[in-house]
Amino acid sequence: MDTGMLMTMLSLVGVRLPILIALGVALVWVVDSPRGAVRTAALSGLGILAATCILGMVVSLLPVWWIQQNQYENLQSLSLWLGVAHFGLSLAEAFGLVLVVWAMTRALRQRGTVG
């Protein structure tokens, strides 16, 4: 593997590392909560957020890999598909965030009615 490619991979992981750590911490907190619809929604949202983060790294790495392989024609022909992939990942990330916020709001409302 080329040093430039390795540095690009490390920088992509480094940029997303704080988000992945936060998602891991949130996952530990949610897994320890009582089973129910709120927990399921929160776990689903966190799973979607983690998947979009990791898939975003892969999609961002593809053009760099194609350039390293001197496959410029692939890069040009697939640039539209890369844009569509980024848009799809953004939609999935928004949906995951809505699930987490819905679960949090629902849990806070339930707590308010108990106490």
Image (cartoon, rainbow, N blue to C red):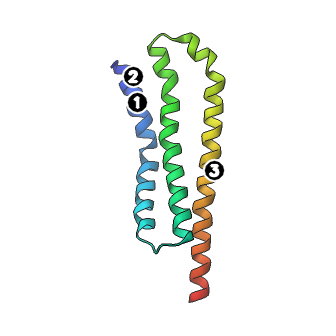
Residue 88 point in image, percent of width and height: 64, 39
The residue indicated by pointer 3 is 94
Q: Amino acid at mark 1?
A: Met
Disc 2 crowd, CA 10 A, few/some/many (<14, 14-19, 20+): some
Front label number (1 vs 3): 3
Using residue 87 as the reference point, say whether residue 70 is left or right of it. left
Element assignment for label 3: helix
Element assignment for label 2: helix
Image quarter of residue 32:
bottom left
For residue 9, which numbered disc appears in the image?
A: 1
Residue 30 point in image, percent of width and height: 45, 66
Q: Where is 77 relative to 46, above or below?
A: above
| Count of all numbered marks drawn on residues in the image | 3
Distance between mark 2 and mark 3 Cα atoms: 30 Å
Q: Where is 27 relative to 21, above or below?
A: below
Image quarter of residue 104:
bottom right
Q: Are marks 2 and 1 in contact (CB under 8 Å)?
A: yes
The residue indicated by pointer 2 is 5
Q: Amino acid at mark 2?
A: Met
Residue drawn where x is 51% and y is 68% of the image? 39
Using residue 99 as the reference point, say whether residue 57 is left or right of it. left
Front label number (2 vs 3): 3
